Image: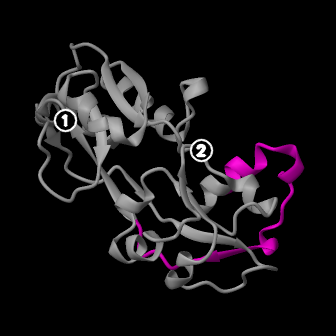
Amino acid sequence: MKRIAILLAAALCAGAAWAGDAIKFGVPDAIAPFVLPSRDSGLLVDIFREALATQGAGAEFVYLPSNRTDEALRTGWVDVVSALKTAPPATGVPGHWPVTHFHNVAITLKVRIPRLAMDDLSRYRVSAFRGASKVLGAAYQEATADNPSYRELPSMPSALLMLGQVDVVISQPDIFRYYLTRQAKFSRVDDNELAFHDILGKGVDYWFQFRTAEQRDVFERGIAA
């Protein structure tokens, strides 16, 4: 009888299987290999899909530019989006813990720029991911604000660094390497050719915002499982 009671308690804690529609995630469209829109896959996408499957729930993914996520949640186009936890969300229910953490650095060719400080970003040709100036802090914004050669691009310009068309790329190292190796010409670039300057702070946590608390809870149970 004691064993039955323990199993019943565990079942109640786990929650009932999800009986609703597939949960729609609004995910960034340019953070390969974590999200791969052309394959409806990626490291994060596959984990989220498998997590919900443990709860009997389906998952669908809508691939969005970073400036469309708030609108997508507000209008009901998607059920879940990621955001910085800088203030209580205007729409939706926040998750209980951050889902992803990104730690970006400034990447240069070691032979050209072996050392780099934050202030140097004001004078080099800098290419960053879309939305970088909004998430990398005040010092970064100040350093790049008046730089006419600063660009934020929808795809990672790893190859442009190797071709000498930019001086600095702002990226997480694994994302930079992924885009670099997609081009056969640069598939065997040695890390010794590159300098990774950890000048942008400790990194950024992203939290999920859900349309309902029920969606949040089934997702978090799935991740735990």
The front one of 78 and 225 is 78
Asked if the residue at tag 2 contacts the one at tag 1, i.e. Cβ–Cβ closer than 8 Å, the answer is no
Instruction: Name the one closer to the observer, 94 or 154.
Output: 154
**Element at badge 1?**
helix
Question: Taking the image as drawn, is residue 134 in sight?
Answer: yes
Q: Which mark is residue 217?
A: 1
**Residue shown at the point (15%, 36%) measured from the top left:** 13
Taking the magenta stretch, the answer to whether it contains residue 178 is yes
Q: From what the image shows, is residue 191 above or below residue 30? A: below
Q: Residue at x 27, y 21 (%)?
A: 77
Viewport quadrant of the N terminus:
top left
Residue 89 or 166: which is nearer the viewer?
A: 166
Part of the protein shown in magenta:
177-203
- Looking at the picture, how far across and down is residue 136, in whole percent? 39, 66
Q: Residue at x 21, y 22 (%)?
A: 76
Viewer-proximal residue among 197 and 125: 125
Q: Residue at x 20, y 35 (%)?
A: 210
Residue indicated by mark 2: 155
Where the C terminus falls, by quadrant?
A: top left
Identify residue type, mark 2: Ser
Please, is residue 39 above or below residue 48 in the view? above
* Amino acid type of the residue that numbered disc 1 sits on in the rendered structure: Asp
